[in-house]
Structures are given as structure tokens and as C-alpha cells.
Image (spheres, rainbow, N blue to C red):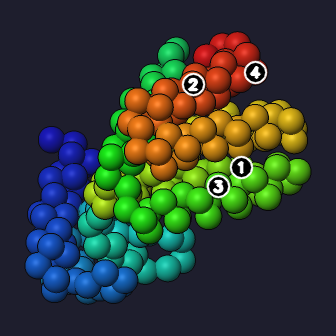
Amino acid sequence: MTEQEEAGRAADQVVREIENRVHSGHLADGEPLPPERNLMEEFGISRTVVREAVRVLSSRGLIEARPRHRPVVRKPSFDTAVDAISGIVTHLLTEPGGVKNLFDSRVMIEVSLARQAAILASKDDMANLRAALDANGSAVDDSQLFYATDMAFHRVLYEIPQNPVLPAIQKAFVAWLEPQWSQMPRLPDRNRENYHAHSFILEGIMMRDPDAAEAAMSAHLKDAWNQVSSTFEDL
């Protein structure tokens, strides 16, 4: 067995113990890990093994490791779970068809969310969608602000089912697709078209018409993909 393999096996024990302490609450969210020297003494391991354990815990989203700072515990959540796979997804997006596959996944989810919203949205949900749409319309001439309010409008749809998985997914979609979106031409006329598309989505939801809401979202995202694919021919 190589030295690296031995360090990895020794680190596994530390990782399991730290995971147990996080899950049991003995290490609370936001609490720093014990200093390296303390971990070395407690587990009878080298500094190399401690740092390998920290690397693994960080890759699993259980701690936040920053240069020149002690690693900090992060309570497991759907956000941390998504963050833990972000590096893998970012790599997959460079593969042929990677961005299209991710965008298609977004389409399937958001079309379903629009349909559900037409059936399930409460008065407060409707008010939140209206407020998000109004903010979006007010930002038509400011492309940077329009992009932020565009994402905010879609985010409300992810929040309506009150399923914590969905906002984490939306946050991930935004982060993973941002490299393409940030290079898209941003013109007031294009912003206005997107605003009107959002208006049609909200209209279907407020009319309690699932078919109309679904069709409006589907048309909106189809148009969005056409814009992306015409800008990036290698997608």
C-alpha cells in the first residue's frame, strides 16, 4: 500500500467520526473544527492525514475550508448537497450536450411548477409572483437588474410547493448556467419580450388554468433556449 493510500484510509476514520459529531449536534453549524494539532493528538495521526480528512469533509459539504482560517462546520442541507456536486456538474457542462441536458432538466421542472402553481398557489403566493413580476417590468431598461429580477420571478415558483429541495435546485441551475447567461446579449427589447412571457405565465396561474400556465412557461423556455443556442453554436 502506498503512503497516499495509507493516509486516505487513516483519514476515513477521522471523516466518519467528524460526520457523526456533525449529525449528532456535538459539532454545531458554524462551529470551527478543533485545531489541527488537537486532531493529530486525538486520533494519533499526522498533519497530512488531518488535511486529507478536511479535504474529504469539504467535498461532502460538511465543512467550509478557507485559506488561513480554521475549517467551519456546515450543517447538512439541500444547499450543501448541491454545492458538493457543483464541481462535477461544472465539468459535465463542458461535455457535448452538457448545457442542453441541464437546460432540458430545468424545463421539465419549471413547466411542472407553473402547472402546479395554477392549482396550488395561495393568495400570498400570487402576491409574491405579482410583486416579482412588477419588479421585473420596472427593470426592463437596466439589463443587470432585469436579470436579477428575472431569476427572482422564477424563484417564487420554486418556493410555492414549500419543498426545500426545489429552491436549492433553482439556486444550482442559476449558478451552473450563469457562464452562458452572462454572455448573452442584453437589450431592452429582449428584456421586454421576457417580461411579457412572465406576464403570460402569471396570467395562467392567476386564472387557475394549469394548461395555460404550462404552455406559457414552455414557450418562454423554448424561446430562451433558442436565444442561447444561437449565441453559442457549440452547445
Q: Dot 4 corresponds to which residue?
A: 231
Against 37, residue 153 (above or below) is above
Marks 4 and 1 in Cβ contact (< 8 Å) = no
Distance from Cα at disc 4 to Cα at disc 1: 17 Å
Mark 4 against mark 3, which lies toward the viewer? 3
Q: Please state which of residues 54 and 87 is positioned toward the viewer in this rendering.
A: 87
Mark 4 against mark 1, which lies toward the viewer? 1
Residue 194 horizontal side relative to residue 41, left or right: right
Q: Which mark is residue 147?
A: 1
Against 144, residue 46 (above or below) is below
Q: Which mark is residue 204?
A: none
Residue 115 horizontal side relative to residue 153, left or right: left
Distance from Cα at disc 4 to Cα at disc 2: 19 Å
Q: Dot 2 corresponds to which residue?
A: 219
- Three-letter code for the amino acid on which mark 1 is drawn: Tyr
Query: Residue at 79% across / 40% down in the picture?
Result: 192
Q: Dot 3 corresponds to which residue?
A: 133
- Three-letter code for the amino acid on which mark 3 is drawn: Leu
